Image (cartoon, rainbow, N blue to C red):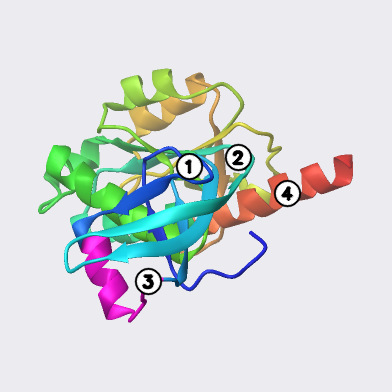
Amino acid sequence: MTRPDRAAFYSEDPFVVGAQIPLSESDASHVAVLRLGVGERVGLRDGAGHIASGTLVRLGRRNALVEVDEVSEVAPPAAIHLLVPVADRDRMLWLAEKAAELNVASWRPVLWQRSRSVSPRGDGPTFRNKVRARMTSALLQSRSAWLPEIFPEATPDRAVAASPEGSRVALEASGRAFGAVQVAAPMVVAVGPEGGFEAEELDGLQSAGFVLASIGHSILRFETAAVACVTVARALLQSIVTSDR
């Protein structure tokens, strides 16, 4: 975008120069809160790599229209797929925000054995909608272009079977230092539940090509471990891209 936008909004409508994109009722209310008026410039994102910029041409209490005058496309970053534990709802939602900010390619909750005793836990279609809402908000705040693909919760076997081939890492305190693990895109990061993986789960992960890796001596909460690992992985993948240029 060549000109700055005061705010950004999410839309799944096609971005075409000259098109008028309607904002949702909640976004129209947010426009009013921001005290934006007709003629103001705003941004649009669809979470699939498309970014648009345009002008507010109509504004009501429950509706608003943006006329698009610039459109661009952003290539997806190196793919990091996250297997998260089904766990405490609030902590999963916090991690969902950070996953979007860090451009995680996909989010797949896993019902590890120790996930089943968690209450209240984050699962089911209603919770997935909340995850998507949190991710969308994070996408707009970070001015990113890509939303993670959100999958329903799965058993460990199904989650592993659905994961792409590539670098596979499972966070485990007894594993090798994460910095010593060879990384390449696509990358799959498996994060265990509170209390860690059960022995048979670790065996299954290793049989599926996951390398056990540690990111420090401290015992971290699952959401802290996930953010730390993805951050380091993103930096390592970026350094590979830079060195190849």
Majority secondary structure of magenta residues: helix
Inter-mark Cα distance, 2 to 4: 12 Å
60 relative to 161, above or below:
below
The disc placed on residue 76 is 2
**Is residue 245 in the magenta section?**
no
Q: How crowded is the residue under tag 2: few (<14 C-alpha within 10 Å), some, or many (20+)?
A: some
Q: Amino acid at mark 2?
A: Pro
Residue 192 sits in quarter? top left
Left-right relation of 235 to 136: right
CA gap, disc 3 and disc 1: 20 Å
Q: Look at label 4 and name its amino acid.
A: Gln
What amino acid is at disc 3? Answer: Val
Asked if residue 47 shows in the view, the reply is yes
Residue pointed to by mark 1:
15
Residue under label 3: 38
Do labels 2 and 4 touch, CB within 8 Å?
no
Instruction: Check disc 1 and give the amino acid type.
Output: Phe
